Image (cartoon, rainbow, N blue to C red):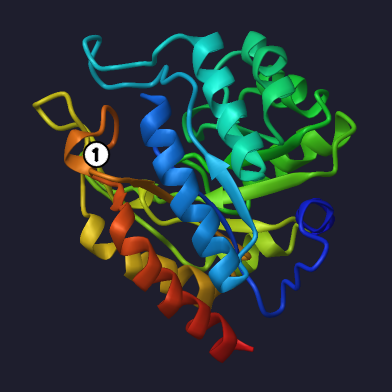
Amino acid sequence: MNSISSLYPQYKPERQFFLLAGPCVIESPQVLRETASELKRLSIKYEIPLIFKSSFTKANRSSLHSFTGVGDQVALEWLANVGQEFQVPLVTDIHQESDAALAAPYVDMLQIPAFLCRQTSLLVVAAKTGKMVNIKKGQFLSPDSMQFAVQKVVEAGNEQVFITERGTTFGYQDLVVDFRAFPIMNAFGKPTIMDCTHALQQPNQLSGVTGGQPHLIETMAKCGLAAGAHGLFIETHPNPAEAKSDGANMLELSRMDALLAKLVQLKHALQ
């Protein structure tokens, strides 16, 4: 837990969960600021260590015509400005080796997308930046197999590794979460995170746009904490219907307060 404690010295994992949250992709300074402002307020209100998340580019869209970003440098600068204004640590994901050196100066954590969690060169270059590394478990991997992804980062000289569960492929258009993953992956000695939004994706839609079930976000979060997750990952947006990526999965920002209130109560009960 040292990596979270370095950002939030008062962090107590036995009574607190930490939160990675923000819009799926950086689409405008206004959306970033509105979301970061509210999340910062809630992190103070509920004493939740927050790492603000947004992707500077989306290299894994279903359709060639889907929005991928406003431009790498511009997006990273907007993200850094928000981090500085609201005094929140930042995380963004990388898709190729060159992204690591590009993004690392702007953020505190680099995230490895689930589809890329076995890419050794990507894991190693992320590790060597010295930033925290969050590896999302592939939809095709067993929880046990994630130990090898963790080892790649550790053996590259970086102990600051996080593991995120985001569901397992179930047929062609659905995902399921096996919550046994948390005790299994907790045994690796690294913080684990429940991705409450991407685990509810409904991929491979004929429209070329991934579907989702955001009404189940609360259920995923509660189950994740009960199963032993140390942190939660929740993508959120002021108006998901207008979001340029993953609108079908994100939690409406106005609903975050009530959700966190319930989750904090649950975490206390689990003690």
Left or right position of 59 against 252 = right
Residue positioned 48% across, 68% down in the render? 224
Query: Who is closer to the viewer here, 222 or 108?
Result: 108
The amino acid type found where label 1 is placed reads Gly
**Residue beneath disc 1:** 247
Residue 24: x %, y % from top left: 39, 35
Assign the N terminus to one quadrant of the image.
Answer: bottom right
Q: State the residue at coordinates (47%, 30%).
A: 115
On the image, which quarter does residue 52 sit in? top right
Q: Residues within 10 Å of mark 1 (few under 14, many from 20)?
A: many
Judge whether 92 appears above or below 47 on screen. above
> Residue 182 placed where, x, y %?
58, 65
For mark 1, give the secondary structure: loop
- Residue 265 locus on image (x, y percent): 49, 85
Question: Which residue is at the far front?
Answer: 85
Q: Is residue 159 visible?
A: yes
Residue 229 seen by the camera: no
Question: Relative to the observer, which residue lies in front, 54 or 149?
Answer: 54
Q: Quadrant of the C terminus?
A: bottom right
